[in-house]
């Protein structure tokens, strides 16, 4: 492993060079004497657990925060003590953030060409803006209509618009923060093809992702950061996913689970020929007590729509749902909760948490009625004690439970969402991509929580984007495409490649 450290991918001079970069926020050292470089025309991947210092490094590169004294920054051969955001932009450093930062009321073309608005102009050349937007989309093979308002697009299409915008601005270094999180595998392949084209033109890409398979596929080199320190820079070719996980965490992650035989377990959920116009058609399946049932398929296959129907948010047009043999009409969330169904949504930030409220308030929100003794309020001491017990029981890392939940890492935010629904003591828990955007260590922790829950006879429907994940965790796997269930697998009967092929064929 040591021989792979700091091996250059070419003889070119680096576009970006950082030496001895440190940054402290209060009593926390976010970065500790980190050296880092990006060569022109390479895809350089940056990986590390949540809270490792990746975001701080990006903020220094983009001028959002300044490094501490003693740091050396060289961009395109010119030294800088620090940068301002607009200065970094002028130097060709552009970021595509996870939240995309698009203008929802503007068109696709206007968003792509929004850099035109940064210059003082007496008039806007709408034809030029539209033409520029179409040119960039054509290079990426994207067929969005240039006049469509961005707010009307899917999350996946908005992601593509954000990437196009960076490319349209003549970027020399494009920083992609979890760029594939909302893309289908076809869109990922298309993105990767374009990144390789950018490489051939000397444009550098900093690719940040928790999806280690993608890191190893697209990256030329990989820099690993752990607890604010650089572990090393490695040539991607020759690294394995397990080796990279070890470098990130400092320990071997070896989650395994024995698949449960379900034949003798009682059926808890039956879905019969469920349909909803333009979403899914004649979907049928069963779920047994203490089973983890995986539901995997490309985005837009109807998997989330099915989950929302089971939780009373998306009533089906036809078909039937039975919970413990009783007909469930799926008309409201309150009814779903009464039937013992809980739902951890795909977008935890918008749908699963009240970000500006405390960790404590987020944890008690689903069990507030149970905690009340009389009147309208829960005694503060009891609420606080209950929240502290929950944080301890679910291994949520937080310095102060009265801190806003937005201050937690992605993995700990997800644990809060899981905990608040588990506290309702459901019979069935639907997890919609629960490890989305979390690191490998947090993933293993969530997997372990799932296994502990099914050990208590809770039944789980796990919706996932990752073939490895459903093979590791699930007892059965359903493949969904075009609004229908097309195949059923047992993890022991197929390889990861078999499963991947069934989804993409």
Image (cartoon, grey):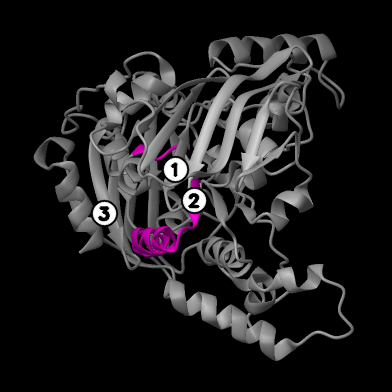
Q: Residue at x 40, y 61 (%)?
A: 302
* Quarter of the image where one finds residue 146: bottom right
Residue 487 seen in the figure: no
Q: Disc 1 and disc 3: Cα gap in Å? A: 33 Å
Name the N-terminal-most of marks 3 and 2.
2
Determine which of the numbered discs, if any, sits on residue 479 in the image. Answer: 3
Instruction: Identify the image quadrant of the C terminus.
Output: bottom left
Q: Nearer the viewer, residue 179 or 477?
A: 179
- In the displayed structure, would residue 374 be above or below residue 47? above
Mark 2 touches mark 1? (CB < 8 Å): yes
Name the N-terminal-most of marks 1 and 3.
1
Determine which of the numbered discs, if any, sits on residue 205 in the image. Answer: 2
**Where does the image place residue 194, in percent across and percent down from the top left?**
41, 64
Q: Disc 2 and disc 1: Cα gap in Å? A: 6 Å
Q: Is residue 477 left or right of residue 261?
A: right
**Where does the image place residue 23, in percent across and percent down from the top left?**
70, 22
Magenta segment's dominant SS is: helix
Secondary structure beneath disc 3? strand
Q: Is residue 437 magenta?
A: no
Number of the front mark, 1 or 3: 1
Q: Disc 3 and disc 2: Cα gap in Å? A: 34 Å
Q: Nearer the viewer, residue 412 or 144?
A: 144
Determine which of the numbered discs, if any, sits on residue 44 in the image. Answer: 1
- In the displayed structure, would residue 212 be above or below residue 131? above
Name the N-terminal-most of marks 2 and 1.
1
- In the displayed structure, would residue 434 be above or below residue 361? below
Please rate how many residues cluster around mark 3, counting C-alpha atoms within 10 Å: few if below 14, some from 14 to 19, many from 20: many
* Residue range of the region highlighted in magenta in the rendering: 185-212
Instruction: Identify the image quadrant of the N terminus.
Output: top left
């Amino acid at each position: 492993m040591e021989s792979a450290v700091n091996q250059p991918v070419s003889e070119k001079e680096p576009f970006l060079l950082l030496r001895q970069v440190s940054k402290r926020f209060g009593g926390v050292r976010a970065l500790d004497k980190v050296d880092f470089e990006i060569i022109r025309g390479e895809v350089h991947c940056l990986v590390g657990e949540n809270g490792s210092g990746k975001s701080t490094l990006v903020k220094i590169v983009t001028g959002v925060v300044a490094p501490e004294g003693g740091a050396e920054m060289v961009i395109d051969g010119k030294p800088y003590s620090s940068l301002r955001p607009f200065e970094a932009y002028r130097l060709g450093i552009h970021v595509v953030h996870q939240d995309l930062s698009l203008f929802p009321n503007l068109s696709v073309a206007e968003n792509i060409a929004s850099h035109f608005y940064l210059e003082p102009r007496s008039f806007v050349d709408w034809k030029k803006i539209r033409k520029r937007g179409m040119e960039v989309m054509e290079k990426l093979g994207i067929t969005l209509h240039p006049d469509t308002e961005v707010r009307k697009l899917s999350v996946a299409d908005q992601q593509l618009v954000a990437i196009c915008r960076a490319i349209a601005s003549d970027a020399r270094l494009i920083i992609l923060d979890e760029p594939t999180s909302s893309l289908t595998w076809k869109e990922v392949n298309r993105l990767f093809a374009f990144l390789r084209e950018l490489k051939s033109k000397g444009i550098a890409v900093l690719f940040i992702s928790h999806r280690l398979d993608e890191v190893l596929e697209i990256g030329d080199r990989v820099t690993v950061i752990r607890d604010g320190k650089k572990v090393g820079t490695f040539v991607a070719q020759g690294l394995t996913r397990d080796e990279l996980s070890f470098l990130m965490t400092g320990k071997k992650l070896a989650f395994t689970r024995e698949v449960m035989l379900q034949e003798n377990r009682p059926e808890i959920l039956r879905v019969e020929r469920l349909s909803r116009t333009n979403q899914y058609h004649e979907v049928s399946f069963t779920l047994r007590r203490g089973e983890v049932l995986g539901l995997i398929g490309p985005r837009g296959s109807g998997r989330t729509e099915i989950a929302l129907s089971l939780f009373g948010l998306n009533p089906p047009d036809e078909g039937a749902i039975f919970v413990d043999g009783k007909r469930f009409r799926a008309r409201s969330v309150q009814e779903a909760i009464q039937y013992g169904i809980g739902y951890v949504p795909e977008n935890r930030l918008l749908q699963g948490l009240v970000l500006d409220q405390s960790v404590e308030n987020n944890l008690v929100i689903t069990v507030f009625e149970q905690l009340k003794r009389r009147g309208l309020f829960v005694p503060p001491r009891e609420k606080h004690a209950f929240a502290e017990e929950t944080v301890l029981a679910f291994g949520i890392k937080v310095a102060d439970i009265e801190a806003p939940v937005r201050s937690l890492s992605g993995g700990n935010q997800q644990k809060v969402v899981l905990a608040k629904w588990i506290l309702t003591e459901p019979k069935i828990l639907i997890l919609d991509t629960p490890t989305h955007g979390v690191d490998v260590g947090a993933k293993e922790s969530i997997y372990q929580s799932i296994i502990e829950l099914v050990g208590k006879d809770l039944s789980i429907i796990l919706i996932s984007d990752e073939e490895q994940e459903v093979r590791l965790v699930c007892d059965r796997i359903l493949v969904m495409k075009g609004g229908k269930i097309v195949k059923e697998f047992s993890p022991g009967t197929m390889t990861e490649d078999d499963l991947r092929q069934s989804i993409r064929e």
